[in-house]
Image (cartoon, grey):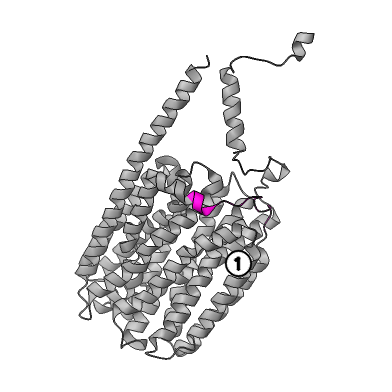
Amino acid sequence: MASKSEPQTGAPCHEDVRDSKTLVETYPVTKDSDPPSLSDQFPEGGLAAWTTVLGSFLVQFCGYGYATSFGVYQDFYTQYYLTNQTSSAISWIGSFNMFLLTAVGIVSGSLYDRGYFYHLMIAGSLLQSFSLFMLSLSKPDQYYQIFLAQGLGSGIAAGLMFVPSTAVVAHYFRRKRTLVLTFVASGSSLGATIHPIMLNNLLNGPLGFSNGVRASAGLVSVLLLIACLCMRTRLDPPTIPVNYIVAARKCIRDVPFVLMIAGAFLFQLGFYYPMFFLQLDSIKHGLSTTFSFYSLVILNAANCVGRVTSGFIAAFTGVPNLTIAATIACGVLNLGFIGLSNLASATVLGVIYGYFAGIFIGSWVSLMADLTPDLSELGARMGICFCLSGFGILIGTPISGALLTSNYIWWIPALFSGVIALAGSMMYILMRLMLLKRRSKERSAQLEVLESHP
C-alpha cells in the first residue's frame, strides 16, 4: 500500500509528454504570468460579449472605415476645394491620417496593457468628433486647416481606438475568436462602403462641404457614443505589462518577423493607390460622374467580402500562403490599372482588387499571431509592426501623387504601385521560407526530446 503513495520517478512516458504539452498550450506560462484561474474560462458569448463586439464593430466603422474613404476627399479637394495644391500634397492628408491610425497603436497598445481602455476609447471618440467638426469649419484653399483637422487630429483619434477596440474582444472569446474578429474587421469595410456614398452625395449636393461634413461628423459622433456605452472589459490588466523594449529586441532577432515587417512596408507603398485615386482616375478617364462616385463603393464592398471570407480560406491554405497569394494578386492588379479606360475595366479592377485587398487585411493580424512564439507579446508586436510598416502608408500615396503630376499621367503611378507591391510579396515569400526552416528545426528538436525519453 505504501508503494502507491510514493511519488513516481524516472523518465516521463509519451503520455506524460503529450499531457504536459496540452497543458502548456491551454495555459501558456511566461515568467510574468499569473497562475491560471477561473477568469481563464472564456464565456464565448453572452450579452456583455456581443455588445462589446458590436461596439468594436462600430469603432472600426467610424475609424478605419472613415479613413479609407479618403478617395472621396481626394477627388473633391483636387477638383474644387484645394485647387492650389497638387495631387501629391493633397494625398499627404489621407496618408498621414492612415499612418497615425496604425503608428499610434504602439502607444495605445501599451496604455491598453496598463488598464487604460476606457480612457483611450473616450478620448479617441471625443477627438474624432471634434476633428471632424473642425474640418467642417475649414475654408477653401486653406491646406493647413484641413491637414491639422483631418490628417493630424482624426488620425490620432482613430489610432487611440484602433488597437484597444480590437484587443478587448479577446477578453470574451477563444474558440470563436477568429470568426468574431473577422466580423469586427468587416466594420471598417462596411464603413468604407457607406461613408463614400454619404460623402459624395453630401459634398456634391445642396448641403455643400461645410454642412455635409457636419452631417457626417454627427453620424460618427452618435455611433462612437453607442460604441463607448457597449464595450466592457472583463479581465484585469497583466500584473507586469509587456516591456516594449524587450519585445522589440526579440523582434530584431526574429528573422521571419523582420521579413514580414519589410514586406508590409514595401507592399503598403503601393497598396492604397487604388483606394485614394480610383474615383479621380474614373472621372479623368471620362466615365460618368454617377459611376465614378460609386467606384469606391464597388471596391470597398468587394473588400468587405474578402475580409469575411479570408478566415475560411486560411483554414485550408494557411495564413502565410494566403497572404502571399493576396499580395501577389494586388501587385498584378495595380499594374492592371494602367489599362483602365472604360466602365467595364474600372468595375472589374475595382471588384477583384477590393476582394484581394480585403483578404490581405483580414489575414494580416492572424499572420502576426502565427509569427509570435509568446502570445503574451502579441499586443507589443502588433504595435511595433503597425508602427514600422505604417511608414509605407505615409509615403506611398504622396509618391504616387507626385508621379501622377498635374498632367494626370496615370500609367506611371500604377506601374510604381504594382512593382513595389510585388517587391513586398517577395519579402513575404522569403518570410515563408524562413518560417518553414524554423518550424522544421522545432519539430526536429521535439523528436529528439521524445526519442531521449523512451
The location of residue 346, given as percent across then percent down, is 28, 68
Q: Quadrant of residue 7?
A: top right
The location of residue 124, given as percent across then percent down, is 57, 71
Whether residue 369 can be seen here: yes
The location of residue 175, given as percent across then percent down, is 59, 43
Q: Quadrant of residue 52?
A: bottom right
Q: Is residue 239 magenta?
A: yes
The residue that label 1 is drawn on is: 120
The location of residue 312, given as percent across then percent down, is 46, 46
* Residue visible at 33% across and 68% down in the picture: 395
Identify the residue at the far right of this view.
Answer: 1
Q: Write the start and end of the magenta stretch as one range.
A: 233-247
Q: Nearer the viewer, residue 384 or 209?
A: 384
* Badge count: 1
Our reading of the magenta stretch's main secondary structure is loop
Secondary structure beneath dot 1 equals helix
Judge from the rendering whether residue 326 lies leftward or rightward of residue 24; answer left or right.
Answer: left
Whether residue 193 can be seen here: no
Is disc 1 surrounded by few (<14), some (14 to 19) or many (20+) residues within 10 Å? many
Quadrant holding the N terminus: top right
Q: Nearer the viewer, residue 326 or 106?
A: 106
Q: Does residue 11 sit above or below 89 in this rendering?
A: above
The amino acid at mark 1 is Leu
Q: Is residue 66 magenta?
A: no
Judge from the rendering whether residue 402 lies leftward or rightward of residue 77; answer left or right.
Answer: left
Q: Does residue 143 sit above or below 88 in this rendering?
A: below
* Residue visible at 39% across and 91% down in the picture: 140
